[in-house]
Image (spheres, helix red, strand yellow):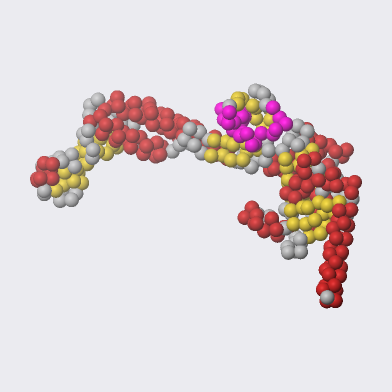
């Protein structure tokens, strides 16, 4: 008996995929058999067929699958699906068949080798592309929520594209671009990976220069005490490209969190400012006392007093940190009193200082000068007196 001919090219391709690309033979063979079944049905019309691929020789056989029945009408109506019991028992070793059994009859066409080779090539190439796409996706998925350096490659109406390597581009939308920056092709920039999606055309990677998390990662990189957990970032409020406020605190009473983040002669914070093209940084100390924290957040303005809304008692700012608590946060309000000559400084240009402080502390902040507050207090005192005089006049009448 002669040895079966081995399809060395096919076996070699399967070995390559398994050893070099990590794609198991079984996965490729299953996909190949399904593709060959479709190819056979398309070219030869039979619907009930199975393709069997021999993983040792690489040879391919096609089998017609029929159900044995005693219904002659069913056999006449669809001989591709049914075989009579009498015909089944005429086959070699067919005496053991019974009604309801399935019989597999080889129907491999002589010219099927050409179709099989073409189909196999398509399947192998498809599996290669899928695996390469998966490898790239898995790699960049690990970069999600991290900083990565890339090179500006092109721009259209929707995105600025950043070449991240491996032939992969990150897409930076309009809201993720800093307004003070203008990108040119080949500019090298650092971006924050906000999302990585798996798409059949390849992984979709979205990056940002405006995300507050980018600032957090830059501080972690520049300040070892943040990286090791000695100093922690409580919150960040940022208007990208213009100004940001960062609230920090220390787990070690001997470590000054603000000074640590600023660095010797401002070197640490200056490195971050340079990376963000001149974005101003206010680093403030986070404390659990809301009044003190709000005063710190309004830096560089001096704060004389913080008066909380009586309907919503002051609580630790840690109690409300989620987006879902938006309505509750809106009720957390206070009035801040500052010296008359500090009012514009506390509010900031176009209200920026107050706005960032409100985001940082999660309190709605109403800023009043000391003289305005005194006038309001005086008016409040005079109002009951006027009412009392009016009541006296009414009683005399």
Instruction: State whether residue 64 is above or below residue 391.
Output: above
Tell me where residue 111 sits by quadrant: top left
Quick one: which residue is furthest to the top in this view? 185
Q: Would you say residue 308 is visible in this rendering?
A: yes
Q: Residue 288 in the image: state x and y as whole percent.
A: 79, 58
Left or right: 245 as drawn, with respect to 205: right
Magenta segment includes 252: no
Relative depth, front residue between 231 and 285:
285
Q: Which quadrant of the figure contains the N terminus?
A: top left
Q: Residue 328 in the image: state x and y as whole percent.
A: 67, 58
Q: Which residue appears at 38% of the width and 31% of the height?
A: 123
Relative depth, front residue between 112 and 361:
361
Q: Which quadrant of the figure contains the C terminus?
A: bottom right
Left or right: 362 as drawn, with respect to 379: left
Q: Residue 363 in the image: state x and y as whole percent.
A: 74, 54
Q: Would you say residue 96 is visible in this rendering?
A: no
Magenta segment includes 181: yes
Q: Which residue appears at 18% of the width and 46% of the height?
A: 67
Report the span colored magenta: 157-182
Relative depth, front residue between 307 and 8:
307
């Amino acid at each position: 008996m002669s040895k079966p001919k081995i399809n060395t090219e096919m076996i070699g391709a399967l070995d390559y995929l398994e050893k070099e690309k990590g794609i198991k033979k079984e996965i490729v063979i299953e996909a190949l058999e399904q593709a060959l079944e479709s190819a056979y049905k398309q070219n030869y019309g039979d619907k009930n067929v199975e393709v069997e691929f021999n993983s040792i020789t690489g040879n391919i056989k096609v089998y017609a699958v029929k159900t044995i029945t005693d219904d002659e009408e069913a056999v006449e109506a669809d001989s591709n699906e049914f075989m009579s019991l009498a015909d089944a028992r005429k086959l070699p070793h067919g005496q053991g068949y019974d009604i309801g059994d399935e019989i597999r009859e080889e129907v491999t066409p002589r010219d099927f080798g050409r179709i099989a080779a073409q189909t196999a090539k398509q399947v192998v190439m498809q599996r290669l592309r899928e695996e390469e796409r998966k490898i790239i996706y898995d790699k960049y998925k690990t970069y999600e929520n991290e900083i990565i350096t890339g090179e500006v490659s092109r721009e259209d109406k929707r995105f600025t594209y950043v070449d991240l390597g491996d032939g992969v581009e990150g897409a930076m939308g309009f809201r993720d671009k800093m307004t003070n920056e203008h990108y040119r092709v080949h500019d090298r920039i650092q971006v924050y990976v906000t999302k990585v999606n798996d798409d059949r055309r390849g992984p979709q990677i979205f990056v940002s220069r405006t995300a507050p998390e980018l600032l957090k990662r830059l501080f972690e990189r520049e300040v070892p005490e943040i990286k090791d957990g000695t100093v922690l970032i409580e919150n960040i409020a940022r208007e990208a490209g213009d100004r940001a406020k960062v609230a920090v605190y220390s787990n070690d009473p001997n470590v000054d969190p603000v000074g640590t983040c600023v660095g010797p002669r401002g070197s640490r914070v200056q490195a971050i400012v340079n990376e963000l093209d001149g974005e101003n940084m206010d680093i403030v100390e986070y404390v659990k006392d809301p009044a003190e924290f709000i005063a710190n957040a309004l830096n560089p303005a001096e704060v004389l007093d913080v008066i909380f809304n009586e309907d919503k008692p002051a609580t630790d700012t840690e109690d409300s940190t989620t987006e879902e608590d938006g309505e509750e946060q809106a009720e957390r309000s206070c009035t801040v009193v500052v010296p008359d000559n500090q009012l514009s400084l506390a509010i900031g240009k176009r209200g920026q200082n107050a706005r960032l402080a409100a985001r940082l502390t999660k309190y709605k902040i109403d800023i009043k000068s000391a003289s305005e507050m005194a006038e309001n207090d005086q008016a409040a005192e005079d109002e009951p007196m006027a009412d009392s005089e009016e009541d006296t006049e009414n009683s005399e009448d």
